[in-house]
Image (spheres, rainbow, N blue to C red):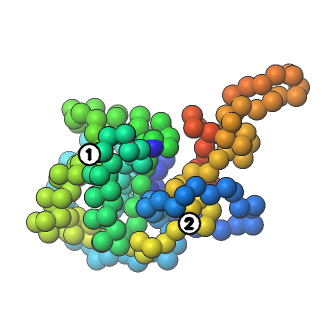
Amino acid sequence: MEDGCSKVVSGGGSGSCGGGAKKPFHFARSLTYHHHQGHRVLPPAAKWRRHQLADEPRARPKDVVLYTTSLRGVRRTFADCSSVRAILRGFRVAVDERDVSMDAAFRRELRSLLDARGRAFSLPQLLVGGRLVGGADEVKQLHESGQLRRLLDGAAGQDPAYVCDGCGGVRFVPCTACGGGRKVFVEEEDRVQRCGDCNENGLEEWQAGSC
């Protein structure tokens, strides 16, 4: 399916998926979880002393952004994404997960971020408070040493069992304008054109990323 469960690394959406709108088609439930109302804020800790690049997308302090993929084409990559996701769930923090297989904009976002640091494109990638932590190996090492807990101090909390009623936990729903077909008929011009409301997969973010 990258680069919260954002919309550049600068921010992850927060809020709830309420509203009286008609309930859209649901994808199968995933492990994706995003910022939601009722967060608890963990105690602040010492700042992580790494310089943030000027061209790196900026996130609010202690936003936790995870770039992943839900595609199983490369088994190791899929397994690494699942491992890092599970580690973060154990800390019960709200994660803005950006599945690059769901939206190419996330992939471009992450590629730009990694290029700015001279790093090769790889998944998963974790950012905390706008700073790049790294991939699966770095996250596991920090977790084993106890440093990851300190990095996550001050992040918004969330029950990992929560699943959004609107999107089923996958952040996206089929486009309401074209039904996911990516084309719409323009009566005035008597022609079919590319739908401007959805991405390359015929998907749109549920209520503009409100979950």
Residue 139 relative to residue 5: left or right = left
Query: Could you tell me residue 126's position as x and y percent?
Result: 29, 52
Badge 2 crowding class, 10 Å Cα cut-off, few under 14, some 14 to 19, many 20 or more, is many
Query: Could you tell me residue 35's position as x and y percent?
Result: 47, 65
Q: Secondary structure at mark 1?
A: helix
| Residue at 30% in and 45% down | 75
In the image, which is nearer the foreground, mark 1 or mark 2? 1
| Residue at 37% in and 39% down | 73
Mark 1: amino acid: Arg
Please say whether residue 210 is visible from this viewpoint: no
Residue placed most toward the observer, 189 or 32: 32
Task: Identify the image quadrant of the N terminus.
Answer: top left
Residue 195 relative to residue 82: left or right = right
Residue that numbered label 2 is attached to: 164
- Compared to residue 120, the image places residue 40 above or below, namely below
Q: Secondary structure at mark 2?
A: loop
**Rendered image quadrant of residue 203:** top right
Question: Mark 1 and mark 2: span between their CA atoms?
Answer: 28 Å
Q: Which mark is residue 76?
A: 1
Task: Identify the image quadrant of the C terminus.
Answer: bottom right
Q: Are marks 1 and 2 in contact (CB under 8 Å)?
A: no
| Residue at 23% in and 48% down | 135
- Compared to residue 89, the image places residue 9 above or below, namely above
- Compared to residue 117, the image places residue 126 above or below, namely below
| Residue at 30% in and 72% down | 91
Q: Which mark is residue 60?
A: none
Badge 1 crowding class, 10 Å Cα cut-off, few under 14, some 14 to 19, many 20 or more, is few
Residue with the most extreme left position = 145
